[in-house]
Image: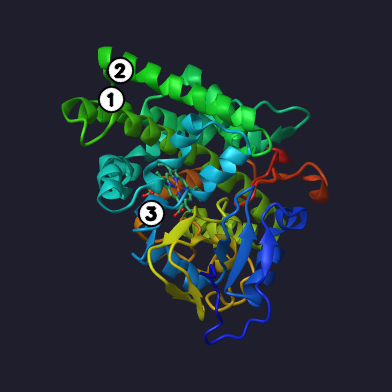
Amino acid sequence: TEPLTEPLTEPVTEPVTVDLLDPDLLRDPFAGFSRLRELSPMVQVTYGSAGTPLWLVTRYEDVRKVLGDRRFVNSPANVPGLGLEDVRAEAFRGMGIEDEYAAYLLRTVLDADGDDHLRLRRLVARTFTARRVQELQPRVRNITAGLLDRLPVRDGVVDLVEDFAYPLPITVICELVGIPADDRGRWREWGRALMRQDDPGGIGAAVAGIVHCVEDLIGRRRVEPADDLITALIRVHDEDGSVLSGFELVTLVLAIVLAGHQTTAHLIGNGVLALLDHPDQLALLRSDPSGRMAGAVHELMRWCGPVQATRFRYATEDVEIGGKILRKGSPVMASLVSANFDPRQFEDPHRFDITRQPDGRRESHVGFGHGLHYCLGAALARQEAEVAFTALLARFPEMSLAVPRDRLSRTSVPGTWQLASLPVRLGAQ
Ligand code: HEM
C-alpha cells in the first residue's frame, strides 16, 4: 500500500519533503518550520538513515490531536498486526550504535503506552507534583544564590550557559534523584554526548557510563538508603519486580536526570537572551517581577522553548490529519516550534509579549507537549526558570550581552533549540 497522504479536503500538489538535518533549518527553525506549516499541515521528513517514510505535523490543532488522541502510540510494538521497527532504532543502527545501548534510550517511560506507561509514570509522578515542587522552592533559591555568589567572572563577563544555566537544574534534579555531587559533572558530559548524533562512539560510551553509574548507585543505596527518589524506586523494585523491573529502574532514573537538566538549562539560557533581545519586555518584567514572572516564563516557553519536536508517535489505524489520511503504522512527529507560532492559535505570533497569559497558568503553548506524555517535570522546570530569572534580574540590573548578537552560536541538534554559550557582562551589582 502507498504509505500515505491522499488529499481529502485540501488540495496538495506535491508532498512537501524536508531534511531535519538541513543546515538552514537548524540555523533558523522558526522561519523554516513556519514556512512548512503554511505549505502543508503534514510534511514528509528524513531522519538519519531510516528508510521508513516519516511525517511531521505542523499546525497547532493537529499537533494537539496527534499528542492527545489515543489512536496514536509511542511504541511501534503497540501497533497491532504490523510488527514495526522503531525508526529511531533503525537510525541508531545506521549510526553504528549497538542495540544493547540503544535499548536504554528507546525503552523509557516516554516509549511506553497504556498500562505500562501509567504504571511507570505513577511511580515518579508524586515527586513532581505542583505541591512537592512548591516545597522545594527554598532549596532551589538557595542553590541559585550559591551559584550566583560563586560565578567565575572574568573581566566582568560570565558565560551564563556554562556557569549558571547548566549547574542549577543538574544540581536540583541530582539532589532529588540521589546522584552524588561528585558524579554530576559526568552526567552533564554524558547528556551532551547523547545529543551529538555525529558521534555514535560517544553515544555508546555515554550510555555505558550512565548505566554503570546508576547500577553502582543502586548497590550503594541498598546498603545505605537515603531520602531520595532512587531509594524509593529500589524499594518498589525489591518488593515486587513486576511493578518495576531492574531495567526499568535504570531507564527511569536515566530519563529523569537527562530530561530534567538539559532542557531546563536551555530554557534559562534561551530565556535570558530573549529578554535581552526585547528591552521593552525586560523593563516591564523588572517593573513587577513577582507579578509578571509566571506570564514571562509562559511566553518564553512558547517563544524559545528548548524542545522543538516530540518523539515519534505511531498511528494504530488510519487517521485523518489536516485533511489528509495518515496510514496505520506511520511514524509521525509533532513540531512544537511550528505549533507555538501558528497564527491560527496565537495572535501576532512573532511578537514577544510577556502579558499574553499573565498568570502563566492555563497553558496555551505546547512547549511541554500535550496529552498522556505531557512533561512530568513541567512544574519543576517552570519554577527553576522563575527563580533563576528573578535572581538574575535582582542582582544584575545592568546585565548585557558581552559579544555581538551574531557571534552567539547554537548547538545544532534537530528538535532542540539551545545556545552553546551566552557571554554576558554583569555590570554593577
Ligand atoms: C516529557 C519538555 C523539563 C521529565 C516531555 C515532553 C516535552 C518535554 C515536550 C513530551 C515529549 C513527547 O511527548 O514526545 C520539557 C521542557 C523542559 C522539561 C521544555 C524544561 C524547560 C523536565 C524536567 C523533568 C522532565 C525538569 C524532570 C522530571 C520529563 C519526563 C517526560 C517528559 C519523565 C516523559 C513523560 C511521559 O512519557 O509520561 N518533556 N521538559 N522534563 N519530561 Fe520534560
- Which residue has dot 1 on it? 231
Residue at 26% x, 12% y: name it.
Answer: 223
Mark linked to residue 373: 3
**Residue 78 percent coordinates (x, y):** 35, 54
Place of residue 273 in the rendered image (x, y in percent of width and height, measured from the top left): 67, 50
Q: Is mark 3 within 8 Å of ligand 1?
A: yes
Q: In this orientation, does residue 144 appear?
A: no
Residue type marked 2: Arg
Circle 2 is placed at which residue position?
Answer: 221
Residue at 32% over, 49% down: 130
Task: Judge depth for marks 3 and 2 and give the one in front.
Answer: 3
Return the mark for residue 186: none
| Element carrying mark 2 | helix
Task: Give the side of residue 362 with respect to residue 27, left or right.
Answer: left
Residue 6 lies in quadrant: bottom right
Query: Which is more toward the observer, 235 or 205?
Result: 205
Q: CA distance from mark 3 to mark 1?
A: 24 Å
